[in-house]
Image (cartoon, rainbow, N blue to C red):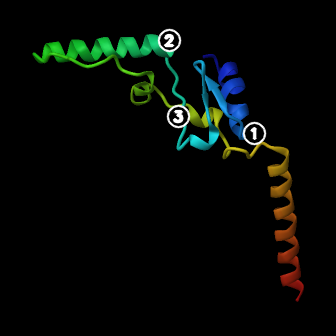
Amino acid sequence: MSADEVKQQISTPYAKARDLYINRRIVKIADLESIAIVETPMPAMEAADLMDREISAEDKRHGLVSLRPPLPPYMLASRFPDVTDRFITEAPGAGTPWMKLALWVSGVVGFAATVWGFFR
C-alpha cells in the first residue's frame, strides 16, 4: 500500500471515526484497541512470506522442525519500522467538523473562564 493509499484508506477514515476497509475486510473503528502502520520494502504478504522463510531457515540451523501455519502479516510489526505517527496524528474522530467545533468552543469557554477569574 502506498503512502497515498494509507492516507485514503486509513488516516482519513480514522480521523473521521469511520470504519476502515483494509484487505477486503471492514474493520469497525469502535473495535480497534490500537493501530500500527509499518513500512516494508515489499507488499505485506510478500514480506510475511520472506519473514516466514527466514524463521524456518533459522529453526533448521538449530536443528528444529517447524510445524506451524504461515505467519500472519500483523507479525511484521516487530520486524519493520513503525511509521504510525506519520499517518495517525489525532484520536479517532478528531477530524470531524463537530469535534473541531467542540474543541473550539471548549477553548473559548476555557479562555473566558480564565479571563473572568482573573478580573474577579
Horizontal and vertical percent position of residue 29: 63, 39
Check contact, mark 1 vs mark 3: CB within 8 A: no
Distance of label 3 from label 2 (alpha carbons)? 17 Å
Horizontal and vertical percent position of residue 84: 57, 34
| Disc 1, SS | loop
- The vertical placement of 46 against 82, above or below, is above
**To which residue does mark 2 refer?**
42
- Going from N to C along the chain, the mark reached first, 3 or 2, is 3
In this rendering, position of residue 9 left or right of residue 117: left
| Disc 2, SS | loop
In this rendering, position of residue 79 left or right of residue 86: left
**To which residue does mark 1 refer?**
16
Nearest the viewer among 19 and 105 is: 19
Horizontal and vertical percent position of residue 41: 49, 14
| Disc 3, SS | loop
Distance of label 1 from label 3 (alpha carbons)? 18 Å
Instruction: Check disc 1 and give the amino acid type.
Output: Lys
**To which residue does mark 3 refer?**
36
